[in-house]
Image (cartoon, grey):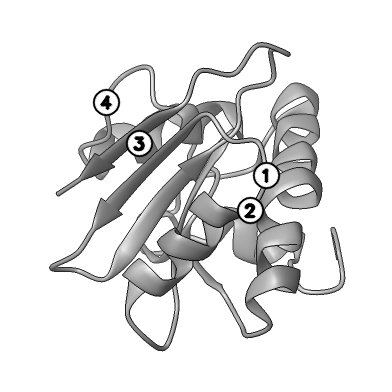
């Protein structure tokens, strides 16, 4: 486990990687970025929300990222991003994030598919970017 509510397995799980026999194992730098993302953003957000947050896509190897149509410089390939969903409306989690003092780099809310992309760069200086799709 990385934290009480998030595991290494869920942060790198991929059905497509499993089905295609693709390695989706992060390197040392990616693992460090994933740990920071979980400890500094995902777990504190989960603690504030008080209910489960399910990771639908965390780390992606370069090959997996290409297969799923990710952008070439995706933060997923660096261990800096995760897509997540909740049982209710994803906008509820977005509002909680906006009211919190949690640091993040990017949040993209996919309303129709009810999930949210969250990222936290490894550099100290984070830019804040919010998008709705």
Name the quadrant containing residue 37: top right
Residue drawn at 72 percent across, 29 percent down: 27
Name the quadrant containing residue 53: bottom right
Mark 1, residue position: 102
Give the mark nearer the N terminus: 3 vs 4: 3
Position above or below: 11 against 66: below
Bin the neighbour count of mark 3 within 10 Å (Cα to Cα): few under 14, some 14-19, many 20 and up: some
Bin the neighbour count of mark 2 within 10 Å (Cα to Cα): few under 14, some 14-19, many 20 and up: few
Q: Secondary structure at mark 1?
A: loop
Task: Judge depth for marks 1 and 4 and give the one in front.
Answer: 1
Q: Nearer the viewer, residue 15 or 84?
A: 84
Mark 4, residue position: 71
Task: Judge depth for marks 3 and 4 and give the one in front.
Answer: 4
Q: Nearer the viewer, residue 95 or 23?
A: 95
Q: Secondary structure at mark 4?
A: loop
CA distance separating discs 2 and 4: 29 Å
Give the mark nearer the N terminus: 1 vs 4: 4
Q: Secondary structure at mark 3?
A: helix
Mark 3, residue position: 65
Name the quadrant containing residue 92: bottom left
Query: Do the residues under discs 2 and 1 have CB atoms within 8 angstroms?
Result: yes
């Amino acid at each position: 486990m990385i934290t009480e509510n998030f595991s290494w397995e869920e942060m790198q799980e991929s059905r497509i990687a499993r089905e295609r026999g693709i390695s989706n194992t992060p390197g040392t730098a990616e693992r460090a970025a994933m740990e920071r993302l979980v400890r500094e953003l995902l777990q504190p957000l989960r603690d504030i929300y008080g209910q489960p947050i399910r990771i639908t896509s965390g780390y992606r190897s370069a090959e997996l990222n290409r297969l799923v149509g990710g952008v070439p410089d995706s933060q997923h390939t660096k261990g800096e991003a995760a897509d997540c969903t909740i049982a209710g409306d994803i906008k509820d989690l977005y509002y909680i994030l906006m009211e919190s003092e949690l640091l993040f780099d990017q949040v993209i809310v996919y309303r129709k598919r009810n999930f949210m992309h969250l990222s936290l760069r490894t550099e100290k200086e984070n830019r804040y970017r919010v998008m709705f799709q």
